[in-house]
Amino acid sequence: MSPVYRSTLVSLAGLAAVAVIAWAAAGAAPGLSVFAAGLLALLVYHVRHLARFGRWVSHPAQGKVPEGAGSWDEVLAALHRFEREAAKREEMLADALARFRRAAQALPDGVVMLDADNRIEWCNDNAAAMLDLDPRADTGRPIANLVREPAFIDYLAAPNHDSMPAVRATAAQGVVLALQLIPYGESQKLLLCRDVTQAERVETMRRDFVANVSHELRTPLTVLVGFLETVRELKLDPSRVRDYLGMMREQASRMHRIIEDLLTLSVLESAPPPPADRVRMAPLLERLRADASSLSAGRHAISLQGSASVDLLGSEEELSSAFGNLVSNAIRYTPPGGRVSIVWSEGPDGVSFTVEDTGMGIAPEHIPRLTERFYRVDRSRSRETGGTGLGLAIVKHAVARHQATLEVDSKLGAGSRFTVRFPPQRMMPVEPLQSRQEN
Amino acid sequence: MGASEHLSKQFEAELEAIRSRVLEMGGLVESQIRRALDGFNSGDRATLDDVIATDHRVNAMEVALDGDCSQVIVKRQPAANDLRLIIAIIKTVTDLERIGDEARKIARMAKNIHERGSVLAPPVVEVRHAAERAISMLRRTLDAFARLDCNAAAEVIRADAGIDAEFGAILRQLITYMMEDPRTISTALEIVWVAKAIERIGDHAKNMAEYVIYIVKGTDVRHTGAVTIEP
């Protein structure tokens, strides 16, 4: 028998016994009224507990299950236990959910959870940043309303997007995103987004590079083949043949230079860090100035400013080829009569090597791309002057291997300034004069 | 009671679907401008031709959305908020279609410029910069429309002045180019058209932002000068 019945029966039996005693002692009326009063008290007790229980049920606050007395106590205690366990379970679930969200939050990719109607259920911070979502306010909004790239809309509407490759979408500021939908659960989806701007750029560079190499090598080859055919087919007088051979030689040496530069670049890219040898700057600067004068052949005013009281640590071959490239560029792109200055300056936070010219200058849109391989500001002109299109790429790589930076500052029509800045750890005081003479 | 609740749910869903389609059209238009400008920068014929060919999709969406809006008005006789939303959508769609036309115009001009082979590089950088601003305005307007966000819309309205100023600067630069070297005139004129189209895109985006405020607040902020939105 359930304890509730038992305790009710016990209290009724007790009440009946008291009533019978009262009846026996004082007669029927008092006996019955004692019984009635007892029943009324029992009713009040039950109604009061029921009312308190009802109040709690309609607003079940955690840990506030009402306490009771008598038979209600057992029932409410059981409810209290049950409620405590439920709270614990809920806490565990919430904890698991929070852990899961933290894990999703920590993913490097953007993650958006979508419901069956493609509405946003949840997104991590990366997704919010990439797709420009508001993690709180945008919950429940259709994803297609906020990510409106037509390719993505089609992808979302496609019946079997799980087998389709990710689509590209352009976000603000030219960022390229790869978006992929992964179905899960009943009909929910996970939208993954990854920033592929860099990968995309590398891919473009690779494609351009292959196309450019082929083009650069084909141009001189076409000329060579043309002359070869002319010489073979036609009877020419020896002086003409000699002229042609001269031109062919020029083209061949052009191809040779391109391949040399390509090899230099690939060595710079794959070789171990340069040795930390002493590179004597004073003679190197003097040599650069002398080379510049002979290249210019008196057409430019060439000056060397600043004297080296420190030397650099690094590879002399790489540094002199990088500096030489900057100087020869300045001379090639400065019309006769212009000025080219080589400036060496030293300071506590490093040294810098600068080549300044009063040449044609470079428009701002070209400057960020100057060090790309085969990038040419003006296609016809630079080939005329004999450039391979690889010089600045070599400079950039060579100086980067010495922890130095290349800065370009230019104004169209007014001239350019190329500065290589070395950090202090690449500096070394010049050796005493005697030891230099001994060497 | 049950029947009318069901009806209003259905109505709600219809409005929601129309709103999503407006935003889809917005996305298409945005990608049209972006590709037209990519083509303008790179001279890629295929992209430019594709932009011109895709314009009919924008037009078809305009016609379809207009039809849907009239349907809703006739069938549901919306009032208050819902009516304002429908009216604003009809106007927004018109502006979007115009932006689509501007994208096509930019693509056409870009084709002309690149077919001729540019004589020199007039202020292309400035044009690109103005274009970035216009695209960002359009994007933010569409976001504001999706979220019914008044403050974002007000920001777009204020941003329009910047594009207008940039258009003026581009124009002055082009005039200098044309005076210096008459061979640049035809290219420069075409660039004026491109810049003008970009400036118009900014204006249309501003109009759309005004409709967003109209939907949310019910106030007409057109031609009222400074926009002040109290939260």
Image (tube, coloured by chain):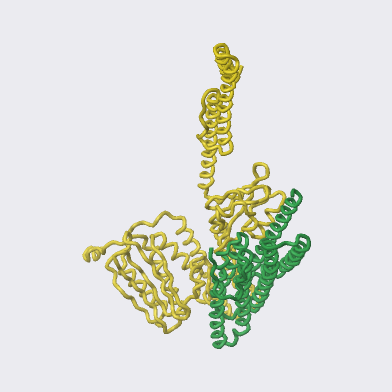
Chain colours: A yellow, B green
Quarter of the figure with residue B151:
bottom right
Q: Nearer the viewer, residue A237 or A111?
A: A111
Q: Nearer the viewer, residue B201 or A159?
A: B201
Quarter the N terminus of chain A occupies = top right
Does the image show residue A227? no
| Residue under the image location 41 percent in, 82 percent down | A338
On-image quarter of the C terminus of chain A: bottom left
Q: Exactly how many numbered labels are in the figure?
A: 0
Taking the spot 56% from the left edge, 88% from the top edge, the residue there is: B179
Residue B225: x %, y % from top left? 56, 76
Q: Is residue A435 left or right of residue B2?
A: left
Q: Quadrant of residue B107?
A: bottom right
* Residue A324 in view in this figure: yes
Percent across and percent down for residue B223 are 60, 76
Q: Residue at x 36, y 69 (%)?
A: A353
Question: Relative to A121, is A428 on the left or the right?
Answer: left
Tell me where residue A136 appears, x and y as whole percent.
55, 52
Looking at the image, is B26 positioned above or below residue A97? below
x and y percentages locating residue A264 in the rendered image: 46, 62
Residue A25 vertical position relative to residue A283 in the rendered view, above or below: above
Near-viewer residue (A22 or A189)? A22
